[in-house]
Image (cartoon, rainbow, N blue to C red):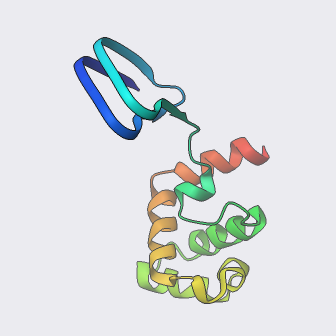
């Protein structure tokens, strides 16, 4: 990601610029004053954070939930989401689980191939 800043003045704030750690920052005429931190380079979100799950989510629970969705891929999204109700992931999340939100997020990530490629990288 490229971040190009030309003739920018930042003052009186907590963090002047917040960007991903791998950002390519090109700045000319940049002035940052009276800030607690001029530039914050963030780590990329984990897979779990990107899916809206707690960072301590057991990976095997996520894999199981994805397998449930995949096994029921011929059904309508609402039916696929309902199948998640009995997954260890939803039981582990407990009352904090928004089944529709979680299911929709996982189906979307699965459809885009985001989750499977990340899991392959994590677990080979």
Identify the image quadrant of residue 24.
top left
Between 115 and 2, the one nearer to me in the picture: 2
Quarter placement of the C terminus? top right
Quarter placement of the N terminus? top left
- Vertical placement of 72 versus 10: above or below? below
Q: Residue furthest left?
A: 7
Residue drawn at the location 24% of the way across and 22% of the way down: 8
Between 57 and 119, the one nearer to me in the picture: 57
Q: Residue furthest front?
A: 34
- Residue 19 appears left or right of 8: right
Residue drawn at the location 44% of the way across and 72% of the way down: 104
Residue 62, how many percent across, how many down?
68, 66
- Vertical placement of 35 versus 27: above or below? below
Identify the image quadrant of residue 54.
bottom right
- Vertical placement of 72 versus 34: above or below? below
Residue 67, how many percent across, how many down?
66, 69
- Residue 34 appears left or right of 93: left
Between 88 and 94, the one nearer to me in the picture: 94
Residue 52, how many percent across, how many down?
53, 64
Q: Residue furthest top?
A: 28
Residue 76, how many percent across, how many down?
41, 80
Residue drawn at the location 70% of the way across and 86% of the way down: 91
């Amino acid at each position: 990601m490229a971040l190009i800043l030309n003739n920018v003045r930042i003052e009186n704030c907590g963090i002047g610029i917040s960007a991903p750690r791998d950002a390519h920052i090109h700045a000319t005429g940049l002035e940052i004053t009276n800030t607690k931190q001029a530039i914050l380079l963030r780590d990329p979100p984990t897979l779990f954070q990107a899916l809206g799950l707690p960072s301590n989510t057991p990976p095997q629970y996520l894999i199981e939930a994805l397998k449930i969705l995949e096994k029921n891929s011929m059904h309508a999204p609402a039916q696929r989401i309902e199948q998640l109700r009995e997954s260890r992931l939803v039981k582990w999340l407990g009352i904090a689980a928004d089944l529709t939100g979680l299911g929709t997020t996982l189906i979307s990530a699965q459809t885009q191939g985001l989750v499977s490629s990340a899991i392959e990288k994590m677990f080979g």
